[in-house]
Amino acid sequence: MGLKFSQVSLTIKGMKYGYARISTEDQNAAMQHTALKRAGCKTIFTDELTGATTKRPALLRCLKKLERGDTLTVWKLDRLGRSLRDLITMLDSLRDRGVKFRSITEAIDTETPTGRVMWQMIGMMAEYEHSLISERTRAGVKAAKKRGVKFGRKRKLKPHQIVHARKLIDDGQRREDVAALLNVDRTTLYRALAG
């Protein structure tokens, strides 16, 4: 009598982790912790930062802990990312790793169709913001060039020094000696003479 084994696929429901961040001494993480616990988070990572500190050790520990199927929950999007671009990058990375995301205040939950649409809209807004910044930067550079502003590194040799260097080389001086006389590297002199 042979036994037949049927293949059973198990869906492992991941862990729910919370992340909270407070940025000034008068803030308290209790409100965030309460909301995260209500959302089912058993483990909550908290960063307490002051001033312009950008290092977030608790967030780094949290991100390392997350595995495929887990959910990262925050009280509000701004607790997780310091800029929209950083936030998009981080959450795209989580999606690629199979980690779900939920923001309680903004009602974003990547497990739901509505949450995924909201996330895509935020991504489009970030892309739009980036294109506006790029456009303004290009316009600013163009306007500055019209005003005569020079971009790039400052030249080490002035035009009269280059003329003098050419004359010395034409009179038989070695290029290495002329470079040493002008207190510049040989390659700097070669570039100036070629330009």
Image (cartoon, rainbow, N blue to C red):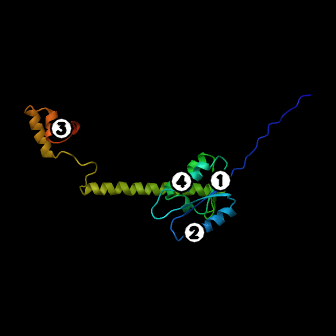
The earlier-in-sequence mark between 3 and 2 is: 2
Residue 140 seen: yes
Tag 4: Cα neighbours inside 10 Å, few (<14), some, or many (≥20)?
some
The residue to which callout 1 is attached is 71
* 108 or 50, nearer to the observer: 50
Which marked residue is nearer to the observer: mark 1 or mark 2? 2
The earlier-in-sequence mark between 1 and 2 is: 2
Tag 2: Cα neighbours inside 10 Å, few (<14), some, or many (≥20)?
few
Q: Position of residue 48 (x, y in %)?
A: 53, 62
Looking at numbered disc 4 in the image, what kind of residue is underneath it? Ile
Which marked residue is nearer to the observer: mark 2 or mark 4? 2
**Dividing the picture into quarters, in which one does residue 47 lie?**
bottom right
Drawn side of residue 41 relative to residue 50, left or right: right
In the rendered image, the residue lying farthest to the bottom is: 26
Instruction: Tally the numbered discs.
Output: 4
The residue to which callout 4 is attached is 88
